[in-house]
Image (cartoon, grey):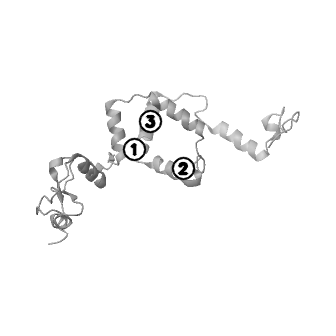
Amino acid sequence: MTFKKGQTAWNKGKKWNEWMSEEGKEKSLSNLKTDNNLGKKATSELKKKLSESQKKAWSEGKYKDRISQDKKGDKNPFYGKKHTEESIRKIKEARVNQVFTKETKEKMSISHRGFHYDLRKNTKNYAAIHWWVRKNKPKSEVCEKCGKKKDYTLEVANISGNYKRDINDYLYLCRRCHMIQDGRIK
């Protein structure tokens, strides 16, 4: 509701119980009467118990999933909007002098290339590990199993099947040798 200059609000100067409906009055008064904790401070034991229950709920993902669903698509407050040139410039200026620790840089590097380590499931992203191997293991010109030179790209194959972050646990193989290694063909 918009007001013109000099216009007053319909409830200005009135007490809440003058303009509230009878049903609303009863409901709010009953809430005040039945609220046993009104005006009391929570004990440190209760605070600790509440804190633990909230931490447990967050770690199990109860709230995270719900919040994620509530902010997807057109429900997101930034949906359909774009940063202005000025705001982009301000963001860039703020990040220019930002200093990160070595540990933070490593975490950022890992997250940007997709090597996500899920602590809850204790699993690693399969594709990201292969990407890491291709980045860190020198590329071979020939298949490391059959020794034939291939005109097409060689694939990264895991030897142990455990997908450890160990360069020696991977080979560059041609497609046929990779499928034999994985047991997909005989």
Instruction: Name which residue type carries label 2.
Output: Lys
* Residue most extreme to the right: 6
Residue 117 lies, in percent from the top left, at: 31, 46
Instruction: Name which residue type carries label 3.
Output: Ser
Residue 98 lies, in percent from the top left, at: 43, 29
Q: Which residue is mark 1?
A: 59
Nearer to me, 56 or 27:
56
Nearer to me, 33 or 57:
57
Is residue 18 placed above or below 167 in the rendered structure?
above
Residue 83 shown left or right of residue 101 in the figure: right
Question: Foreground mark, 1 or 2?
Answer: 2
Q: Residues within 10 Å of mark 3 (few under 14, many from 20)?
A: few
Q: Earlier in the sequence, mark 1 or mark 2?
A: 1
Instruction: Name which residue type carries label 1.
Output: Ser
Query: In the image, what residue occupies the spot 34% across and 38% down?
Result: 107
Query: In the image, what residue occupies the spot 31% across and 50% down?
Result: 121
Residue 108 lies, in percent from the top left, at: 37, 39
In which quarter of the view is residue 31 placed?
top right
Nearer to me, 30 or 186:
186
Could you give the CA–CA distance between mark 2 and mark 3, rounded to whole angstroms? 25 Å
Residue 168 lies, in percent from the top left, at: 14, 49
Q: Quadrant of the N terminus?
A: top right
State the mark number for residue 51: 3
Q: Which residue is mark 2?
A: 71
Residue 40 shown left or right of residue 186 in the figure: right
Could you give the CA–CA distance between mark 1 and mark 3, rounded to whole angstroms? 12 Å
| Secondary structure of residue under mark 3 | helix
Q: Earlier in the sequence, mark 2 or mark 3?
A: 3
Question: Foreground mark, 1 or 3?
Answer: 1
Q: Are marks 2 and 3 in contact (CB under 8 Å)?
A: no
Question: How many marks on residues?
Answer: 3
Q: Residues within 10 Å of mark 1 (few under 14, many from 20)?
A: few
